[in-house]
Image (spheres, grey):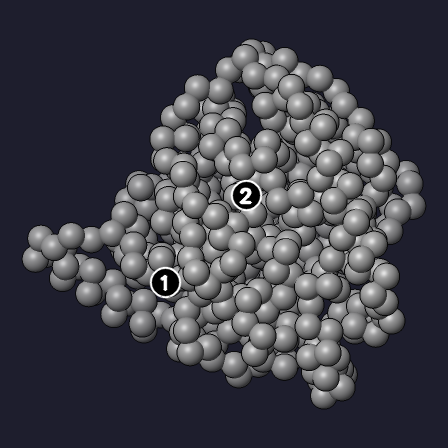
């Protein structure tokens, strides 16, 4: 399986640039070690031999971790992130690090030091970000599993743009360290009150399997919470006859007509196939975009990153330079925290009486690379960041949220449907996603570039072996 993964990377990544650092030699050595354990009849973990890609913001001991920044071009951590520790202990084989925008401060896939990651469904377009390379890797079968991180949608965004399942569990379910926790690494370690690490996979069950390994408290993360969920059992639970709140646009966001059409079609699966009651709602909050970035500023090591700017500014991403040069005031940070509290209160009040909240994941299908976002949507001029408006509020509230494929546009581009659960109801989100997947499956749909062996797309030799 490891050899097949590395061969698929060699065949496709020259086009997609999903990986910025490969660990092929170490991966094959790990694979041989696991083969020997199996031959001796020894106990192996639930992910034994499964190739996994790790986002380049997530620390990997002895493997370069750049965060997409010239400041960390040659940085090699001396410890694994907790999640990487746990995946390795379960037998997963890390085959490489996946590309990100600089420090993850963007929803796309380009940075100053590596080639731009491209969307497997159309390489002229972005795969979304900031877990850009992880999305491209799983969408093409370069790896069956990938680790992403989500501070404002960065697991769900590429999941939507690449036709995958991606989930951020409730705040604290999956511990983070050293990412977001270690003061030694400005830029790489930030967004403590917003960030989640999460799985990106081709099926809901595969993500549940990853979460069964990744979740659980750790003393290195003061926000981590107990793991009281049977993740694999959650995907088997019945999800029928539930009450669902639905908002297409939050009442203030411009949404592309193709997205609206596909999301409405997906909503009918819940209504007709799963016998759910759908209520259209208009949330009573205003766009919290400025407050979100105030929280990011509060979580960021502005002093350390500004020192970095003085040394590496000429090589840094313009939008990041603008963020760091903004004269952030204490009042901006306190106002952002006040608005987060208000948003959380409005959210739980709106969610009363509902089992699930459904929205589009993003407002647009994939768009061309080397832009932060479209400035015209559905005939309206909008800020280039508005396409993310439906994702980041749930980082502010900490609720579990996932993106599942709503469908593909007439031009063959994937569109995501976002499922948001009640506070700490990760199991409910997984159950809903699994029920939708069974009623409207997507895992057999592959980008045309995956037909690299002369076989039909999706039938390459190791697919069945890779499905735990």
Front residue of 272/176: it is 176
Q: Which mark is residue 138?
A: none
Residue occupying image coordinates x 41% and y 49%: 216
The residue closer to the viewer here, 327 or 338, is 338
How far apart in space, not on screen, are marks 1 and 2 (Cα)? 20 Å
Q: Residue at x 42, y 48 (%)?
A: 215
Q: Nearer the viewer, mark 1 or mark 2?
A: 2
Asked which secondary structure carries label 2, the reply is loop
Asked if the residues shown at circle 1 and circle 2 are in contact, with their CB atoms under 8 angstroms apart, the answer is: no
Q: Position of residue 268 (x, y in %)?
A: 63, 17
Upstream in the sequence, badge 1 or badge 2? 1
- Checking the image for residue 85, the label placed there is 1
The residue lying at 52 percent from left, 43 percent from top is 169
Q: Is residue 381 left or right of residue 84?
A: right
- Picture quadrant where residue 269 is located: top right
- Residue 98: x and y, percent? 51, 63
Locate the N terminus by quadrant. bottom left
Label 2 CA crowd tier, 10 Å (few <14, some 14–19, many 20+):
many
> Dot 1 lies on which element?
helix
Residue placed under numbered mark 2 in the picture: 170
Quadrant position of residue 233: top left
How far across and down, in percent of the image, does residue 271 sit? 61, 14
Identify which residue is drawn at 29% across, 54% down.
90
Residue 105 relative to residue 437: left or right: right
Residue 387 as seen in the image, left or right of residue 125: right
Above or below, 75 against 330 in this view is below
Q: Is residue 37 left or right of residue 312?
A: left
Which residue reaches farthest left? 40
Local packing at callout 1 (Cα closer than 10 Å; few below 14, some 14-19, many 20+) is: some
Q: Image height check: is 315 above or below 241?
A: below
Total labels drawn:
2
């Amino acid at each position: 399986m490891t050899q097949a993964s590395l061969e698929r990377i060699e065949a496709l990544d020259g086009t997609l640039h999903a990986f910025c650092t490969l660990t092929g030699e170490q991966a094959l050595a790990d694979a041989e070690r696991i083969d020997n354990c199996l031959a001796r009849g020894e106990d192996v973990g639930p992910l034994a031999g499964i190739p996994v890609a790790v986002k380049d913001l997530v620390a990997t001991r002895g493997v370069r971790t750049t965060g997409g920044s010239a400041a960390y071009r040659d940085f090699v951590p001396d410890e694994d992130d907790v999640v990487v520790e746990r995946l390795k202990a379960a037998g997963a084989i890390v085959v490489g690090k996946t590309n990100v925008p600089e420090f993850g401060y963007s929803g796309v896939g380009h940075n100053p030091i590596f080639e731009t990651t491209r969307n497997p469904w159309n390489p002229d377009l972005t795969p979304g970000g900031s877990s850009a390379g992880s999305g491209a890797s799983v969408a093409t079968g370069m790896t069956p599993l990938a680790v992403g991180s989500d501070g404002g949608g960065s697991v769900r965004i590429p999941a939507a743009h690449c036709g995958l399942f991606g989930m951020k569990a409730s705040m604290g379910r999956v511990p983070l360290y050293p990412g977001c926790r270690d003061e030694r690494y400005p830029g790489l370690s930030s967004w403590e009150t917003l960030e989640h690490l999460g799985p990106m996979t081709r099926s809901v069950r595969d993500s549940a399997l990853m979460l069964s390994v990744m979740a659980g408290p750790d003393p290195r993360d003061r926000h981590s919470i107990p793991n009281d969920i049977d993740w694999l059992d959650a995907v088997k639970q019945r999800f029928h006859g539930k009450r669902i709140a639905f908002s297409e646009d939050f009442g203030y966001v411009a949404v592309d007509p193709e997205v609206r059409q596909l999301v409405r079609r997906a909503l009918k699966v819940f209504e007709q196939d799963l016998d759910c009651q759908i209520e259209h709602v208009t949330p009573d909050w205003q766009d919290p975009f400025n407050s979100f970035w105030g929280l990011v500023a509060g979580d960021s090591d502005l002093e350390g990153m500004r020192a970095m700017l003085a040394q590496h500014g000429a090589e840094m991403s313009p939008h990041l330079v603008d963020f760091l040069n903004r004269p952030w005031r204490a009042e901006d940070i306190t106002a952002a925290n006040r608005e987060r509290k208000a948003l959380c209160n409005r959210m739980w009040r709106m969610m009363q009486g509902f089992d699930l909240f459904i929205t589009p994941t993003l407002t647009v299908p994939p768009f061309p690379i080397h832009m932060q976002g479209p400035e015209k949507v559905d005939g309206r001029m909008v800020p280039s960041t508005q396409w993310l408006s439906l994702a980041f509020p749930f980082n502010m509230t900490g609720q579990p949220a996932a993106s599942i494929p709503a469908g593909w546009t007439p031009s063959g581009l994937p569109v995501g449907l976002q499922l948001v659960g009640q506070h700490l109801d990760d199991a409910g989100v997984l159950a809903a996603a699994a029920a939708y997947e069974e009623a409207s499956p997507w895992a057999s749909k592959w980008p045309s570039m995956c037909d690299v062996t002369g076989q039909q797309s999706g039938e390459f030799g190791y697919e069945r072996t890779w499905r735990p």
